[in-house]
Image (cartoon, rainbow, N blue to C red):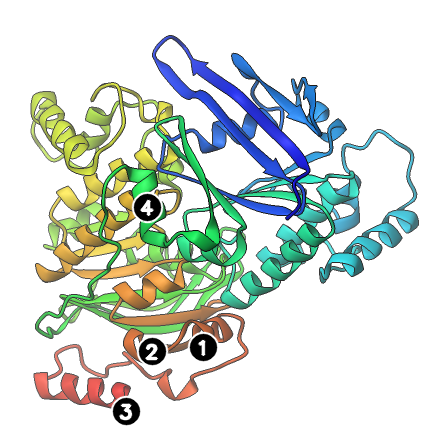
Amino acid sequence: MNNKIALELRNITKRFGTKVVANKNVSLTLYKNEILSLLGENGSGKTTLMNMISGIYFPDEGEILIDGQPAVIASPKDAYRYKIGMIHQHFKLVDTFTAAENIILGNNEPYKLKVVNSRVKEIASKYGFDIDPQKKIHEMSVSEKQTVEIIKVLYRGADILILDEPTAVLTPQEIEKLFAVLRRMRNDGKAIIIITHKLNEVMEISDRVSVLRKGEYVGTVNTSEVSEKMLTEMMVGKKVDLKIDRVSVEIKKPLLEIRDLTVKSDVGTTSIKDVSFYIRGGEILGVAGITGCGQKELCEAIAGLRPIASGSIMHDGSSIVGMSTREIINRGISMSFIPEDRLGMGLAPSFSITDNMMLKTYGDGHGPFVDRKSARARASALIDKLSIVTPSTETPVRRLSGGNVQKILVGREIESGPNVIITAYPVRGLDINSSYQIYDILNEQKQKGVGILFVGEDLDVMLALCDKIMVLCHGEVMGVVHAAKTTKEEIGLMMTGSLDKSELKEYGKAKDSNLSEEEWKNAEKEMEE
């Protein structure tokens, strides 16, 4: 890192309305040849701050300097003019276009695709990207789509790059490749800001770390001089235990058995093919896989929200296939489903927290009147327990930050007292402190004998939290492994299909739902061997 400043923020303040101050007097510096990580809890103002740099918001107070000169960034077009490019967590690509067509999309200059393809290959060669400019987006993996987004801003001449949660949906091998690219970009003089919640990656890739807390600047430290624990204390303002305990409980028979399950996607393609496993009471079974490998369809099928093409879903030896969620509950299976689409499927965005708490019980036969007083009390208790930042229990959830919305969804589902929990990415978008609160809650449920299916993306967390991990690749099971007896690298290879633990594929394919305890123990012994 040299001492030449690429970007400087001076006393930046941003308000929304009269009550919400997202950023207050924030000042920080980004150097050329530097990778700076930006950390902070949910609602700390990280995204708002980056949105002002990239032209989506305009600061109410303070100034932004680029290369030492005051800059007025009133739109994304202004940001491009100042050679600033932001790579968002949710890609902004046209699926039916090629990589090259997406890269030049929005440029108001004449172009020839042959020239664009040549320029894209030149950028890819310089930084170590692997990309086919003529490949269509819908044919690409998540990693390839991210590559298109990064090359898009480089093509427009970006010298300052902002990446929002860039590793959230990548395998360990893909993360390693991305970090190698970022280091080459840094060495080429680029200035890079990374927003992430993964502290191990912060320690690996960044040169310095800036921390925000409740919208205010806490400080910037050299990464080589701090630990994960110190960074967490800077974010939270107090000491936090960063240990995930894999709780040991008594082995129980399966609550649910899934056999030879095949599920179709919304467009009719096969998302899940001949998948078999079981979920036992007091066990957390992780599901690892690259995004789009059938996790969503699997969860929805088990929860009774998606029809299955073939196979069976059993509870205590009886099929629950074709039953509605209400019928499943009436069978005594109190199942909670925490979907990845928190606002589209999990909650009603325009409803208050209180009203969203009532959604699980509305229509239970209590007559035409609803008990809002009880729901408000439960909402208030949830806000206190999970430290949800909200003006009141009557605030519409769409007005809250993503992390606080996720806490409401997780808290409501746990509060219903389930014996089976199906959860997809329950800590996505949550800060480190909130994430550990959720891990503790899941462990509490496990100790109560609840069976948990945990679809996750952070393999370090899955290895620490889960008892076993089932790995999917293109909708098929590559194997089920004991979390304590595998590695992140092995799971990464299974996720890409490079490693097929075929000897484990018969795991969970029970011939009889009512196996004896001895038979279950023998099955477990075979797995361990």
| Label 2 vs label 4, nearer the camera | 4
Q: Where does residue 11 sit, x and y in percent of width and height? A: 50, 19
Q: Earlier in the sequence, mark 2 or mark 4?
A: 4
| Label 3 vs label 1, nearer the camera | 1
Report helix, strand or loop for mark 1.
helix
Q: Is residue 159 above or below residue 142?
A: above
Report whether 359 appears left or right of 88. left
The reply to whether the C-beta atoms of the residues labelled 1 and 2 are less than 8 Å apart is: yes
Q: Earlier in the sequence, mark 1 or mark 4?
A: 4
Q: Which residue is mark 3?
A: 529
- Front-lying residue, 117 or 20: 20
Report whether 492 appears left or right of 354. right
Identified by mark 4, the residue type is Thr
Q: Where does residue 323 sit, x and y in percent of width and height? A: 24, 53
Distance in Å between CA atoms under marks 1 and 2: 10 Å
Q: Earlier in the sequence, mark 2 or mark 3?
A: 2
Q: Where does residue 498 sit, x and y in percent of width and height? A: 54, 78
Q: Which residue is mark 2?
A: 481
Distance in Å between CA atoms under marks 2 and 3: 11 Å
Q: Earlier in the sequence, mark 3 or mark 1?
A: 1
Q: Earlier in the sequence, mark 1 or mark 2?
A: 2
Badge 4: residue crowd in 10 Å (few <14, some 14–19, many ≥20): many
User: Residue at horizontal 24%, vertical 81%?
Assistant: 510
Report helix, strand or loop for mark 3.
loop
Q: Which residue is mark 4?
A: 232
User: Residue at horizontal 23%, vertical 48%?
Assistant: 240
Identified by mark 3, the residue type is Glu
Distance in Å between CA atoms under marks 2 and 4: 31 Å
Report helix, strand or loop for mark 4.
helix
| Label 1 vs label 4, nearer the camera | 4
Q: Which residue is mark 1?
A: 490
Distance in Å between CA atoms under marks 3 and 4: 39 Å
